[in-house]
Image (tube, coloured by chain):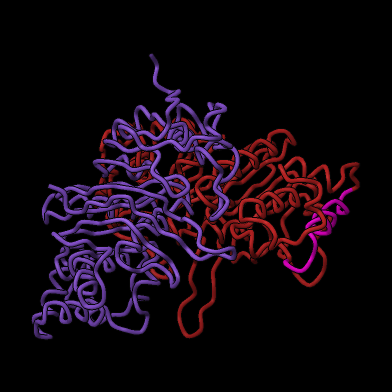
Chain colours: A red, B purple
């Protein structure tokens, strides 16, 4: 039983005088209780739109999002349904996600009041590595990494069962990135909270996720257990992403280049959306939309893995 | 034969309580056709020491030391002599291509202005040169691209255009400051391959500034590791990455997502301007620190600024 179940989700943005952009074009994703899922993809692939739709911050054009068995209702003028308070979020920019005019303690206190809890604001601050005295201070008195710690404390204080974190470390200094990623994952594990960790950095996700979902141009093209997906990617795009990660091994190996840019989602290529950039594309890829198939524990959308004996993982 | 030879560079920046050292006595060289990597956390003085070479420090800053380049001392140049070097013999590419490209001028205009200024060629010749440069950095349809604006290109394409602009006057040295930090890994791979190709095919020398040791591992020949305005370790890339000798370098490597070690962050935060600890600036964060580390400031000896040398197995 999945805690979060996304089925054939579509989200489109309206544009004045121009056709709509289908930013998420039929994506499937699930997060099990206590599981940490990493969602990776290039800029503009629809990761953030998918996250916002999962949280009910955007109204889907099609498909469904279920959280804990019930459909997630898009945020309207009324308060969120009580059950959805167990769905919390952490955003990329800790300068924008905290209220700059309220004290840190008051903002974490709001979250504590959502669910009856014996914990206090001070305990949460301590758990994220900040002094209890931080409660009386304002967000501008903290660095980016410290603010993200506050955002983590606020999300966890609401006693969520799932946290959606959209690029929570991308805006931070290199030295703070590892600290914050570790803190978030350690706390999620100790609290038994599921985590959907969205990042463009496959190398980081590989370190922390149980399962990785790779997104390309509005679709999840492959999901699989982290180690298997890294070692034997089934989709050529996953393979290209992994090959482009520079290896700190001192061997002077240039990372592999993936030519071309992500196409405009308003006019996606026909057939497989990756075929114009795919190094192993063949003629059918330009016309047939690959269905999702299962291959050695991966779910993959690629024609190489649809018929007869599954081909070996592309290298 | 080195293209650039910097020694004892110091940069004092104005702060609330007087001038504070942002760069405190660093020296480095860049050889012909060499890619030199400069690593370190933000605020360690990497960028400001490069800006100092080009006379681009903020008002009120004081720069001392020497920087030999083409038979001249860059730090002694002023006015026109400095402007002749800047943008012509030494070019810079910054992190965010959207801030280095003018949003309201065509690519063609931006790629020809400095070429015409420095080299005094005709507009037509400069445009032909610009199209060549765009082709060199692999922009599709270079002639058509000259008439377009920066917003019509993706982030990776913009960075390629910024690099083409930097190459306009065939510089001897390119300073690339975090050129791939804002880009996706797939795009970053393309830019790194481009820099490597410019070095081998066009004989360019490159200083590549980044906090990402993975990036440096793939293209840099030698590394300088900065901490709190000083160089703490220097040497060939493979030696430093495979066998770091300074505890800070080891910490940086352990904080990288690698299969073996995982994410092990360095505890604490780097010191801020004007609050650099006495002795070895790294000692409050160092697991191997001894009493002497809080007193004696280690000098860079044989590529290492750590007299204890705790990581070398004897």
Name the one closer to the observer, A24 or A156: A156
Split into 4 quadrants, where in the image is the C terminus of chain B? top left
Residue A79, compared with residue A301, is above or below; it is: below
Query: How many numbered marks does the figure carry?
Result: 0
Direction top: furthest residue:
B314
Rendered image quadrant of residue A217 = bottom left
Dominant SS of magenta comes to: helix
Give the percent coordinates (x, y) of residue B86.
Answer: 24, 69
Vertical relation: A295 (above or below) A112: above
Q: Is residue A228 visible?
A: no
Q: Relative to residue A79, is residue B199 depicted above or below?
A: above
Q: Residue at x 71, y 49 (%)?
A: A67
Magenta residues, as a range? Answer: A100-115
Residue B94 location, quadrant: bottom left
Residue drawn at (23%, 67%) of the image: B166
Q: Nearest the camera: A71 or B40?
A: B40
- Point out residue A209 in the picture as x, y percentages from the top left corner: 56, 37
Q: Confirm whether the magenta stretch covers residue B29.
A: no
Q: Is residue A159 visible?
A: yes
Residue B215 position in % (x across, y down): 34, 45
Magenta-drawn stretch contains A103: yes
Residue at screen point 82% across, 69% down: A78
Tell me residue B45's x, y (percent).
43, 54
Please, is residue B227 above or below residue A297 in the view?
A: below
């Amino acid at each position: 039983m999945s805690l979060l179940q996304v089925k054939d989700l579509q989200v489109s943005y309206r544009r004045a005088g121009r056709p709509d952009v289908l930013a998420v074009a039929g994506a499937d994703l699930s997060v099990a209780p206590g599981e940490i899922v990493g969602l990776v993809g290039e800029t503009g692939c629809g990761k953030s739109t998918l996250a916002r739709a999962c949280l009910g911050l955007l109204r889907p054009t099609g498909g469904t999002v279920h959280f804990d068995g019930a459909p997630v209702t898009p945020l309207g003028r009324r308060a969120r349904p009580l059950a959805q308070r167990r769905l919390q979020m952490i955003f990329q920019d800790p300068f924008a996600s905290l209220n700059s005019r309220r004290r840190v303690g008051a903002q974490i206190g709001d979250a504590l009041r959502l669910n009856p809890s014996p914990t206090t604001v001070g305990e949460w601050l301590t758990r994220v590595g900040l002094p209890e005295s931080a409660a009386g201070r304002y967000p501008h008195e903290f660095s980016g990494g410290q603010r993200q710690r506050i955002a983590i404390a606020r999300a966890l204080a609401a006693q969520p069962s799932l946290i959606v974190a959209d690029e929570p470390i991308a805006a931070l200094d290199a030295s703070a990135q590892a600290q914050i990623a570790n803190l978030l994952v350690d706390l999620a594990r100790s609290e038994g909270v599921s985590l959907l960790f969205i990042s463009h950095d496959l190398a980081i996700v590989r370190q922390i996720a149980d399962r990785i979902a790779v997104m390309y141009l509005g679709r999840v093209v492959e999901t699989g257990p982290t180690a298997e997906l890294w070692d034997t990617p089934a989709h050529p795009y996953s393979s290209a992403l992994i090959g482009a990660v520079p290896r700190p091994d001192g061997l002077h190996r240039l990372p592999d280049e993936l030519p071309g840019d992500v196409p405009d989602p308003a006019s996606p290529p026909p057939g497989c959306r990756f075929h114009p950039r795919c190094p192993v594309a063949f003629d059918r890829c330009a016309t047939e939309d690959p269905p999702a198939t299962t291959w050695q524990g991966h779910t993959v959308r690629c024609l190489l893995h649809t018929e007869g004996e599954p081909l070996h993982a592309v290298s | 034969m080195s293209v650039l030879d910097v020694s004892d560079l110091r940069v004092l920046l104005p702060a609330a309580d007087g001038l504070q050292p942002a760069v405190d006595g660093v020296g480095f060289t860049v050889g012909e056709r060499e890619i030199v990597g400069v690593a370190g956390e933000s605020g360690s003085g990497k960028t400001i020491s490069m800006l100092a070479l080009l006379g681009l420090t903020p008002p009120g800053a004081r720069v001392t030391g020497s920087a030999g380049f083409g038979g001249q001392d860059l730090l002694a140049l002023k006015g026109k002599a400095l402007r002749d070097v800047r943008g012509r013999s030494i070019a810079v590419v910054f992190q965010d291509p959207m801030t280095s490209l003018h949003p309201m001028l065509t690519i063609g205009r931006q790629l020809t202005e400095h070429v015409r200024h420095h080299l005094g060629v005709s507009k037509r010749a400069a445009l032909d040169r610009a199209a060549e440069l765009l082709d060199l950095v692999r922009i599709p349809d270079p002639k058509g691209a000259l008439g377009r604006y920066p917003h019509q290109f993706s982030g990776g394409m913009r960075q390629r255009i910024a690099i083409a602009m930097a190459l306009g006057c065939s510089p001897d040295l390119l300073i690339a400051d975090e050129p791939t930090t804002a880009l996706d890994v797939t795009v970053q791979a393309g830019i790194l391959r481009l820099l490597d190709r410019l070095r081998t095919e066009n004989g360019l020398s490159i200083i590549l500034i980044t906090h990402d040791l993975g990036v440096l591992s793939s293209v840099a020949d030698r590394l300088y590791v900065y901490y709190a305005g000083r160089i703490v370790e220097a040497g060939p890339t493979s030696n430093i990455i495979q066998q770091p000798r300074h505890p800070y370098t080891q910490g940086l490597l352990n904080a990288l997502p690698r299969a073996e070690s995982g994410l092990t962050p360095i505890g604490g935060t780097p010191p801020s301007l004007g609050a650099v600890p006495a002795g070895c600036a790294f000692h409050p964060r160092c697991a191997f620190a001894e009493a002497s580390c809080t007193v004696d400031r280690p000098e860079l000896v044989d590529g290492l600024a750590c007299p204890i040398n705790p990581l070398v197995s004897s």
